[in-house]
Every structure is written in structure tokens, then in C-alpha cells.
Amino acid sequence: MRTTKAEVRGMFARLVKAMNKRIDGGSRNGLALDYAACYGGYVVVEYTPDGGESHPFGCRRRTAKEMYLSISMTATALEQVNK
């Protein structure tokens, strides 16, 4: 079954909420879901206050299905811990 961009974005929003962080709106402050088909798919980027960035799920880009599953497992675990 195919995983859509909308499904990945929705799961990313769930992850950000579970992490108690915010989605970057272009200000380079918070978490961003970066997508580039020519580079292989999705990567999560966390921008730091000092202007740097990190990749909490690693630097390797993932397909929509791989990213959805990675984010889903992490979000579910965090939601259980935060109960």
C-alpha cells in the first residue's frame, strides 16, 4: 500500500506534538520535515537556536513508507511515556 505525503505530514505533526516542540515555519526554529525526491525522500531536521541543525532520525533520507513507520513508532512511544 502506498503512503502519501499527506499521511507523512500528519504523522510528523503527531510526532512534534508528542515531543512538545513546534514545527518550523520557515524561521529555522523547530522541527522540519524536509522532502527532496531527487535525493531519495524525507529527512527530519531540527534547527537549533544557535543557527545549527541536527537530524534526530539520522541523515539518511527515507521513502514515505519508511519515514511514516519511523515517525509512527517514535510518536507512539513518546505518547505512552507522556501519559
Image: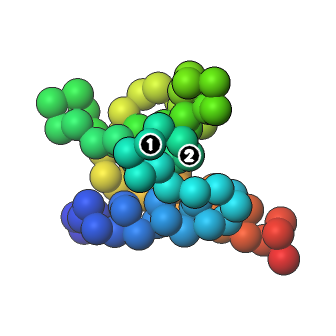
Amino acid marked by disc 2: Gly
Q: Residue farthest to the left? A: 38
**Residue 25, image x and y in percent?**
41, 52
The quadrant the C terminus occupies is bottom right
| The disc label shown at residue 27, or none | 1
Amino acid marked by disc 1: Ser
SS under mark 2: strand
Tell me the crowding category of disc 1: few under 14, some 14 to 19, or many 20 or more residues within 10 angstroms, Cα based. few
Q: Are marks 2 and 1 in contact (CB under 8 Å)?
A: yes
Determine whether 57 is above or below 79 in the image. Answer: above
Q: Residue farthest to the bottom? A: 83
Q: Is residue 78 visible?
A: yes
**Residue 78, image x and y in percent?**
73, 62
Q: CA distance from mark 2 to mark 1?
A: 8 Å
In the image, 83 versus 50, the foreground residue is: 50
Residue at point 55% right, 35% down? 47
The quadrant the N terminus occupies is bottom left
User: Which residue in the protein does label 2 denote?
Assistant: 30
Residue at point 15% right, 30% down? 38
- Determine the image quadrant of residue 8: bottom left
In the image, 10 versus 63, the foreground residue is: 10
Left or right of 8, for residue 77: right
Left or right of 43, for residue 14: right
Residue at point 26% right, 61% down? 5
Residue at point 47% right, 60% down? 12
Q: Is residue 69 visible?
A: no
